[in-house]
Image: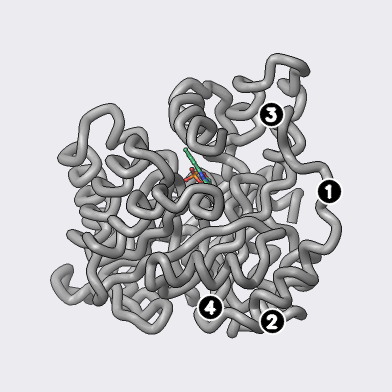
Amino acid sequence: MRKARKKEHVENYLRTSFKGDTLLGDVYLPHNALPELNFDDINTSLVFLNKKINYPVLINAMTGGSDFSEGINRDLSTIAREFNIPMAVGSETIVLEDKEAENSFRVVRDIIGDEGIVIGNIGGLSSSEDAKLAVDILKADALQIHLNVAQELVMDEGDRDFKGVLKNIESIVKSVEVPIIVKEVGFGISYDVAKKLYDVGVRHIDVSGFGGTNFIEIENLRNPSMDFTELYSWGIPTAASIIQVRKLPDDLRIIASGGIRTSMDIIKSIVLGADVAGISGEILSYLVHGGISNAMEYMENTIYKLKVIMMLLGKKELQELREVDYKVTGKLKEII
Ligand SMILES: Cc1cc2nc3c(=O)[nH]c(=O)nc-3n(C[C@H](O)[C@H](O)[C@H](O)COP(=O)(O)O)c2cc1C
């Protein structure tokens, strides 16, 4: 059941047509005509999850569990290794039902090697034992816990009881040795939710906001019994979510995801307070439509333009991006 569903998610993602808005377009960055920098000196590397990575980009959770998923994970992890960026796998809950599914996840660590960053993934109600298993399978550097209430509610067979998730996350934070990243799947994290997570010890939040992959639409395409079209615009736009979550103390690391497609999206996310930006749907599209070389070329262009934009802002190091005097306009200004 889970295996078939994972394949349908990829297929249905490619069929979706609703266009959401991250509102990153409402962030204005000022041009610097006198950067006084040499392009070659611009530094896009950083330390994330205790390892050095070359770019503030991660390939975010998508798949695993079947031969079909293994092929995708192979390609994505090859890209992650090539650029020395982290990669998160899709939900590992499949492995709890079917041991054979492990290989489709392990392949990611095998390809990336011990030097790179691999991130595991489980649900908010998974037990601490399952969380440890999810880490062990990958020798994971961190573990994502996904919050996907909107997705589950639109699934005919989805969960309906979300009581006890926060307490469970607290237990996992206390019992698992690697950092826990709590993430949404495309509907965003509000300040209040982030504060609750922070207060139980979570120090990494992936906002995964509205404006990219839309799991209400993906699940609606699989649900013959009720139509949820009216909810397609549900969610906190990614830009608004980053700004809200950034109000928490600086020791909270933020991953910006949800509709991150371009270098400009990545830079704006960092200016707003994220440490790295996660990409799922966009790289999957490049991969499915043109193979690994197409996805590699997309990544190559994206990271080149990160440097271009840093130069245009007069910033040599990523941490200097936090000092950019940005302005918030339009709908984003109204929301925040
Ligand atoms: C095909 C597909 C499968 C996904 N599966 C998972 C998953 O298993 N676990 C998870 O936490 N997020 C999953 N996601 C959500 C992404 O990690 C991400 O939060 C979301 O897609 C928003 O980012 P995007 O707009 O760049 O796609 C999936 C996304 C896609 C496109």
List x then y, in percent, for residue 7: 45, 31
Q: Rounded to the nearest whole Å, what is the CA distance between mark 3 and mark 2? A: 32 Å
Report, in whole angstroms, how far the alpha carbon at label 4 lies from the one at label 2.
Answer: 10 Å
Is label 4 in contact with label 2 (beta carbons under 8 Å)?
no
Residue type, mark 1 in image:
Asp
Residue at which label 1 appears: 161
Q: Residues within 10 Å of mark 3 (few under 14, many from 20)?
A: some
Residue that numbered label 3 is attached to: 232
Q: In front: 97, or 10?
A: 97
The answer to whether 214 appears left or right of 11 in the picture is: right
- Asked if 22 appears above or below 87 in the picture, the reply is above
Q: Point out the tag, 3 or 4, that comes first from the N-terminus.
A: 4
Q: State the residue at coordinates (33%, 80%).
A: 51
Residue situated furthest top in the rendering: 224
Return the disc, 1 or 3, that comes first in the chain's sequence. 1
**Residue shown at the point (21%, 54%) measured from the top left:** 78
**Disc 4: which residue:** 179
Residue picked out by circle 2: 201
Using residue 323 as the reference point, say whether residue 313 is left or right of it. left
- Decide: is 198 above or below 282: below
Instruction: Give how far apart the Cα atoms at labels 1 and 3 are.
Output: 22 Å
Give how far apart the Cα atoms at labels 2 and 1 are. Answer: 23 Å
Q: CA distance from mark 3 to mark 4?
A: 32 Å
Disc 2: residue Cβ within 8 A of ligand 1's nearest atom: no
Amino acid type of the residue tagged 3 in the rendering: Tyr
Query: Does residue 269 appear in the picture of this structure?
Result: yes
